[in-house]
Image: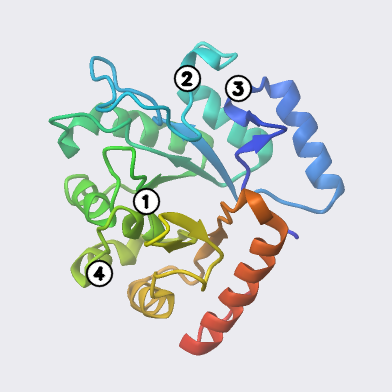
């Protein structure tokens, strides 16, 4: 392993760590020859001001901004990314609430772009089912309403969209692909309603990857495997890596 996108350490989200603690994490990774391309932060994976989440149920990997050791969790996320020397920072779109419109995030988008410029990082907006931007279609709608986003780019998670019963359309993919430089990979058993190793589920990954990559302008797209199989994480990861190699060979994509 040479590259590892980071979210948690010992069950603690990195956004809940002080910078001295993050520096220790960075030193440990560096001593093992591991770099961090992306800080997969939980920024905006919390309720929007004045808009409590629609169902009020607990959310996996959500974050309480009050648990951040710094007074400004968004700024702290960029500081964590800088400490990790991560060139990308993942963000969300607030927990889903009634009446959301893409324009609701205008002020947040402006601030993220200003901080991205200041810290020289790329901000990646991921579609997450529990958030307002949950499906690939909703991600496309957000970026349609956010023209010339520059350092803000779509982090396309096709598995998330399938898990919502909302497979992406060719039009959705075509609208997002030109600015995609990071994707998340995981598979889904729709009948069992759970994540399975890549290649073992119902997502037609060869087709999905082929049409996405066909429209990409970036010379290299980072693909981050998300195993999400805690019952057998090591084997699930190995199976996912093997499946990615098979799929890449099938569609003529080089892995580096």
Q: Which of marks 1 and 2 is in front?
A: 2
- 46 relative position to 40: left or right: left
Q: Mark 4 points at which residue?
A: 174
Kindly check if marks 1 and 2 are in contact, taking CB atoms under 8 A apart as contact: no
First in sequence, mark 2 or 3: give its number.
3
The answer to whether residue 204 is left or right of residue 81 is left
Name the residue at 54% across, 23% down.
Answer: 76
Q: Which of marks 1 and 2 is nearer the N terminus?
A: 2
Residue sticking out furthest to the right: 31
Tag in front: 3 or 1 = 3
Disc 4 vs disc 2: which is toward the camera? 2
| Spatial CA span between label 1 and label 2 | 24 Å
Element type at mark 4: helix
**Secondary structure under badge 3?**
helix
Q: How far apart are marks 4 and 1 (CA)?
A: 14 Å
First along the sequence among labels 4 and 2: 2
Mark 1 sits on what residue? Answer: 153
């Amino acid at each position: 392993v040479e590259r590892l996108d980071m979210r948690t350490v010992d069950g603690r989200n990195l956004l809940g760590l002080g910078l001295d603690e993050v520096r220790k994490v960075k030193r440990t990774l560096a001593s093992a020859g591991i770099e961090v391309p992306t800080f997969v932060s939980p920024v905006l994976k919390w309720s929007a001001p004045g808009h409590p989440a629609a169902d009020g149920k607990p959310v996996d990997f959500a974050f309480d901004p009050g648990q951040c050791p710094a007074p400004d969790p968004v700024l702290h996320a960029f500081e964590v990314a800088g400490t990790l020397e991560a060139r990308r920072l993942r963000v969300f779109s607030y927990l889903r609430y009634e009446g959301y419109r893409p324009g609701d995030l205008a002020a947040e988008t402006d601030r993220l772009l200003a901080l991205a410029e200041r810290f020289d990082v790329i901000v990646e907006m991921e579609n997450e089912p529990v958030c307002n931007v949950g499906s690939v279609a909703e991600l496309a709608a957000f970026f349609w309403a956010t023209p010339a986003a520059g350092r803000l780019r779509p982090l396309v998670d096709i598995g998330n969209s399938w898990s919502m019963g909302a497979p992406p359309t060719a039009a959705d993919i075509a609208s997002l692909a030109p600015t995609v430089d990071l994707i998340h990979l995981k598979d889904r058993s729709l009948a069992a309603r759970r994540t399975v190793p890549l290649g073992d589920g119902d997502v037609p990954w060869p087709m999905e990857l082929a049409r996405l990559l066909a429209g990409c302008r970036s010379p290299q797209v980072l693909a981050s495997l998300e195993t999400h199989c805690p019952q057998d994480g090591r084997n699930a990861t190995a199976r996912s890596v093997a499946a990615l190699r098979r799929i890449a060979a099938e569609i003529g994509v080089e892995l580096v």
